Amino acid sequence: MAQSVRRRIADIARAEPDRTALVGFDTDLAEEVLSWREFADRVADVADALGAALDRRTRSCAVVPAGNTLPAAIGIAAALTAEVPVFPLNPGTPSAERDALLGLLGRRFGHGYLMDAQLRPQRMDLPTGPELPTGGSAAAEGPGLFSAAAEGPGLFSAAAEGPGQFSTVAYLLATGATTGIPKISARPGPLSYDPAWTPSVVIRQTGWRTGQRQLIVGPLYHAAPFTAFLDALLDSNTVVLQPFFAPQWTVELVRRYAIEWLQLTPAHMREILRLPDPDPAGFASLRAMLHTAARCDADTKRGWIDLLGPERVYELYGATEGIGVTLVRGDEWLARPGTVGRGFLTQIRILDDIGNPVPPGTTGTVFMRTPQRVSRADYVNDQAIRSTLDGFATVGDHGRLDRDGYLYLEPRDHDTINVGGEKVDPDEVEAALRDHPAVIDAVAVAVPHQTLGSVVAAHIVLRPGASVRKAELAAHCGRRLAGYKIPKHFTFVDQVPRSAAGKIQRWRLAPYHENGATPP
Amino acid sequence: MVSLPEISEVLSAHPGVRRAETAIVRCDGRNVAIAAVELSGYVSGPILRNHVRRELGEDSGLAGVLIVEHMPMTDGAVDAGYLASAVAEGRCILFEDPRDDVERRLAAIWSAKMNVRSVGVNDDFLELGGDSLSVLSIIAAIETEFGRPLDVYEFMSAASVRQLAEILR
């Protein structure tokens, strides 16, 4: 039933050689189009070159600098075709972070093959990280993924290999962009095509159709755009790759290529809504917009529901870790504002601090269980996934269920700002600030305070040409927020550090010191 | 009926199990065999129970398997009182046959689509080894058999043959 990636791409190219597989843009932003035949030929050539370069005596992976370009797309497809584990690397990764990531790969792989601009594999020695135990039950406690013990005859383990065998890996993804500590998760492989599994059952619920035209806005080195690209590849779609996000351009690409399916982050959504008069007619071709990656504030959500109508707005909440997902469509959200939906092929349990289930309406830690769950040790480095004896796992999010099983999330602990014992959700403060006509983006952070422990401070990005006094921003917040939630300090910045997935990278912000002094 | 040490031995030989002890426990007025196991990998209770039934026969008498962090011992033997309280608290699902026609038809569908011989009416779908592929084929079969649409969410929240039967009746 299942087909190799090589076979699948060849089959599509044979069936519909002249249909467009990929649309990309070169460095001058000139359009480049590949038909399925051209794409399949390029992928086969690069896969053969990679296979020939491979040192078979040692475990190897391919590293593809994965901006949203045709070479990146071809490189990724080629590695999957050659069944070499592929790691899509953010080409803009600072060197220290890059070394840390390659070190993580070095724990598992002897050689990495960096795909250069001409898609020639260049062998590089990976820095060696700490040794991993190889097999045996001790490995389950070890720092990592790739340990064989967890691949035992578990309920959820995807790999059917016995103890002592290493599972093979289809691809590796860097995660942890919000904490600043790089980590890598791996998906067992090799990747194959099975019409019953491609795309996953949950993605199929979001208006996806085989052969559709879809736009990839987020970068290919992030989980959601990457997996959307793989699904598109195996499902014979036409993919348009936007090399970098610019809201007006995204809208233009949707219109010009009659895009049917689109995945965005809340940050993308906000910027598109801020365009002067976004025209609903420009989105007429769109069957669905799916958003993932970060919490979406209510104003942005309503803005998109107004723009597209509730039946075309989908939201997915789920950790990259594959613990489980919830799905909610716009009409369900309107009936229960703020929910992230019901578990999809996922059982949800809310547990208190000592592990007992709590009734509907009560907040606790969100545990989920799903058949797709990867095995417990599915991480390259240490990972704070806690699980119960019966297979429910959590990434530590807090939330509650209503009586009908809809999940509502609380702000994450590490983001909550504690002002003299009062909890402040930074999302709420940021939403209030963004509501000001002069403000494009905002981040609320905690600042140490002598008596209150901490107070709220804000980094503000102003609309080009706009100006506003700090006192006016404070007054603006005062009309919307309780007193303790109003930022006591404002700093104007050129931009807010966000990961390409749109998550705020709070650790990249210059620290506020006590009483709000910013460093020179 | 096979002996308790035989059951413990078969369980201990399973690659996901570190230690297993079996005891006779009084539940709802009847005596049943229940095993407590410490795991080395992740395996569910129903999968281990079915493993024993496959190795020792459907009439091996093992009603349930309780996953424990540490073996509950009292006076050098596994603590039967602890096992009984786990059953009473719903932490250990006991095998139970269908009690009517709806449950029987549902259990037969699960069994066929999941390729699992013993489906207890209270077994959890995921714990029995269900995956997203079997969800779809089971839902399709139920819709045909009962002539009623069933969505994925209804199915997953029911999770057992008995609760599903209540939705369908």
Image (cartoon, coloured by chain):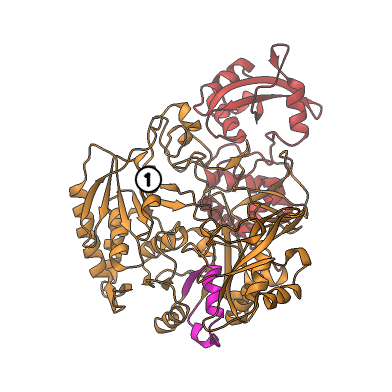
Chain colours: A orange, B red
Q: Relative to residue A59, is residue A314 drawn left or right?
A: right
Q: Is residue A341 visible?
A: no
Tell me residue A155's x, y (percent).
Answer: 53, 39
Q: Relative to residue A358, is residue A126 drawn left or right?
A: left
Chain label for disc 1: A
Tell me residue B68's x, y (percent).
Answer: 65, 28
Name the one closer to the observer, A373 or A508.
A508
Give the residues in magenta. Answer: A261-286
Q: Reply above or below: A58 against A32.
A: above
| Residue drawn 49% across the image and 63% down it | A501
Tell me residue B25's x, y (percent).
Answer: 74, 23
| Residue drawn 47% across the image and 73% down it | A261
Name the one closer to the observer, B163 or A227.
A227
According to the picture, the residue beneath numbered tag 1 turns out to be A169
Q: Reply above or below: A108 against A80.
A: above
Decide whether residue A247 is among the magenta residues.
no
Q: Relative to residue A27, is residue B45 drawn left or right?
A: right
Q: Reply above or below: A120 against A391.
A: below
Decide whether residue A271 is among the magenta residues.
yes
